[in-house]
């Protein structure tokens, strides 16, 4: 029996992927330190040596900006933080993505296991950010 309200864990990730190592220099280009980068060498050997993998599953260079919120009721909270971090950098990032052929997206992960449900409402500012970056917003919701 729950005695206090438990709210979900919500993680928002701005993710960029590329076959080109130049993406690892993104911090210097836009002035934002990533939460995590991943080199092709960091992938498991079984994936690096599997030529039959679909393109989207093949090892690549990754640049991630991760915002984690514990005990969070609304996806609005981490999305607002991401929007503030990107403020004024959207056009430059969009141009770099286009110029270099990088993949970009925003991923929202909601872990509602044994918690109250999260508010899954996209604030207008978040929709504008996705539009300005020319990227999608995808969701992973866990309830088990």
Image: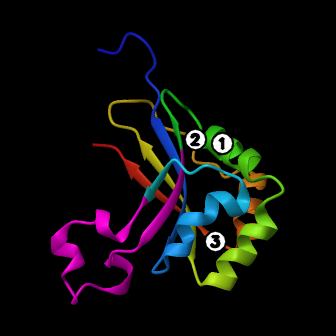
Provide the secondary structure element on which disc 2 rests: loop
Q: Is residue 17 magenta?
A: no
Nearest to the eye among marks 2 and 1: give it. Answer: 1
Q: Which residue does the numbered mark 1 point to in the structure image?
A: 76
Q: Residue at x 71, y 43 (%)?
A: 80
Q: Residue at x 54, y 31 (%)?
A: 72
Q: Are marks 2 and 1 in contact (CB under 8 Å)?
A: yes
Res. 8 image quadrant: top left
Nearest the camera: 35 or 67? 35
Can residue 137 be seen here? The reply is no
Picture layout, residue 101 above or below residue 35: below
Secondary structure under the numbered disc 1 in the rendered image: helix
Q: Position of residue 119 (x, y in %)?
A: 57, 41
Q: Locate the N terminus by quadrant.
A: top left
Estimate the spatial distance between the alpha carbons at disc 2 and disc 1, rounded to whole Å: 8 Å
Quadrant where the C terminus lies? top left
Mark 2 Cα shell of 10 Å, populated few (<14), some (14-19), many (≥20): few
Q: Residue at x 21, y 66 (%)?
A: 44
Observer-nearest of 89 and 118: 89
Q: Which is in the foreground here, disc 3 or disc 1?
A: 3
Residue under numbered circle 3: 135
Query: Which numbered tag is attached to residue 119?
Result: 2
Label 1 environment density (alpha carbons within 10 Å; few <14, some 14–19, many ≥20): many
Q: Is residue 45 visible?
A: yes
Q: Is residue 17 above or below residue 114?
A: below
């Amino acid at each position: 029996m729950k005695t206090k309200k438990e709210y979900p864990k919500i993680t928002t990730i701005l993710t960029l992927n590329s076959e080109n190592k130049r993406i690892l220099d993104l911090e210097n280009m836009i002035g934002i330190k990533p939460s995590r980068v991943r080199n092709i060498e960091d992938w498991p050997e079984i994936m690096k040596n599997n030529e039959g993998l679909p393109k989207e599953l093949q090892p690549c260079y990754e640049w991630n900006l991760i915002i984690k919120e514990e005990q969070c009721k609304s996806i609005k909270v981490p999305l607002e933080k991401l929007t503030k971090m990107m403020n004024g950098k959207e056009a430059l990032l969009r141009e770099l993505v286009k110029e270099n052929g990088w993949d970009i997206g925003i991923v929202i992960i909601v872990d509602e296991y044994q918690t109250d449900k999260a508010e899954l409402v996209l604030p207008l500012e978040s929709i504008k950010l996705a539009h300005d970056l020319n990227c999608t917003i995808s969701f992973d919701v866990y309830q088990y």
